Image (cartoon, rainbow, N blue to C red):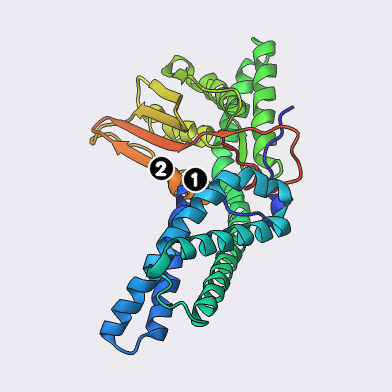
Amino acid sequence: MNEARSIKQNSLPDALPNFRNLGVTLRILLLSNAIALLVAVIKARGWQDFLLQMLQIIALLTPITLSSLLLLGLLQPWLYRLGYGRGVLAANVSVSGLALFVYYLGGELYQPDLDGAAYFDVLRCVSLSVAMCSLLLMYFRLRARGLSLSLEDAHLQVLRARIRPHFLFNTINAVLGIVRAEPKRAETALEDMADLFRMAMAEAQDLVLVQQEIQLSQQYIALEQLRMGDRLSVDWQVLDMPDDALIPVLLLQPLLENAVYHGIESLIEGGCIQVMLRRNGGTLQIRVGNPCPTAGGEPHLGNKIALKNIRERLSLLFDAEASYQVIRGADYYRVEITLPYVKEKRHDHNRTGFARLHR
């Protein structure tokens, strides 16, 4: 059986950041420039000197930062294999080497004097590069630890939003209604319900195979169809979806539950939920849409905890590379999610959950 990614196994993750992640890149650029601004303020003797100091620092910092991000992105798989401690050392050596190369490549731009002070400038350039790299890696390490705790809290919120008492009672009543007339169907329904609650009560997870999430969602729909009958139908469109694609656990099912509870259930004639999953290059696109009562109808009122939880988990897991959008119309409601195409890596148990995200 394919293993899901466990949060509890990574409660204190020590892993290098994903240098290929857009959010990580933006944070590095913002933090490095903030440090440069602070250094310029400390060294400046006035406003004009501050501008001069800032220009000098940025002129050296920008090529070093951009080339370091490119190099570390290329070396990322190798750095992960080294482990955290050696990976940090290798990253610092790479960044300091690039800093030294850029410094000499800049010629007179960075080396206006050829006396002994030039060697001091070289040492200062390398030392500052190592210090900045170490500070940024420490920041991402502390942030990863905070994310681990946040993901555990998010899982608890999933449980609170996921197990609604009326869903349990309605399902049991529906099973009781068919247990004598259709015993086989009643047995299947109880197995589906057991699978749903087993997943909800299982050890905290972050990513699972998309096919596993689809199967779980189909089991949920089968349970709802016991009591709603032909009023509820689902149009599944799974397009170009690789078998090794991973998505956050309990992502689809809460969206479907929201569509049933706030949409289909409120319509006398029922309706069809449109579910689309497809791969588009390096991203996965998920869309769940449903008809809903018009402005004059009376839809269920809910606290939308599950949808809020999905947004939070997407942000925690994928940072700026994931998006969540809600589109409302007069008689329809649609949720559109875009997230990176993350592949499952088998037979790899010596890294943390964040380090196992492979593209």
For the residues labelled 1 and 2, say whether their Cβ atoms are less than 8 Å apart.
yes
Q: Residue furthest bottom?
A: 45
Q: Which mark is residue 314?
A: 1
Q: Determine whether 336 is above or below 51 in the image.
A: above
Q: Which residue is mark 2?
A: 323
- SS label for mark 1: helix
Residue 174: x %, y % from top left:
58, 23
In front of the other: 299 or 213 = 213
Residue drawn at x 62%, y 34% as measured from the top left: 208
Report how far apart the C-alphas of labels 1 and 2 lie in the structure.
8 Å
In front of the other: 13 or 334 = 13
Q: Quadrant of the N terminus?
A: top right
Label 1 crowding class (10 Å Cα cut-off): few <14, some 14-19, many 20+?
many
Q: Determine whether 177 is above or below 155 in the image.
A: above
Q: Earlier in the sequence, mark 1 or mark 2?
A: 1
Q: In the rendered structure, which amino acid carries the disc numbered 1?
A: Leu
Q: Determine whether 289 is above or below 156 in the image.
A: above
* Image-based side of 46 in relation to 167, left or right: left
Residue 188: x %, y % from top left:
67, 18
Label 2 crowding class (10 Å Cα cut-off): few <14, some 14-19, many 20+?
some
Residue 150: x %, y % from top left:
58, 56
Residue 76: x %, y % from top left:
60, 46
Residue drawn at x 44%, y 28% as measured from the top left: 281
Residue drawn at x 42%, y 59% as measured from the top left: 63
| Residue 308 shows in this picture | no
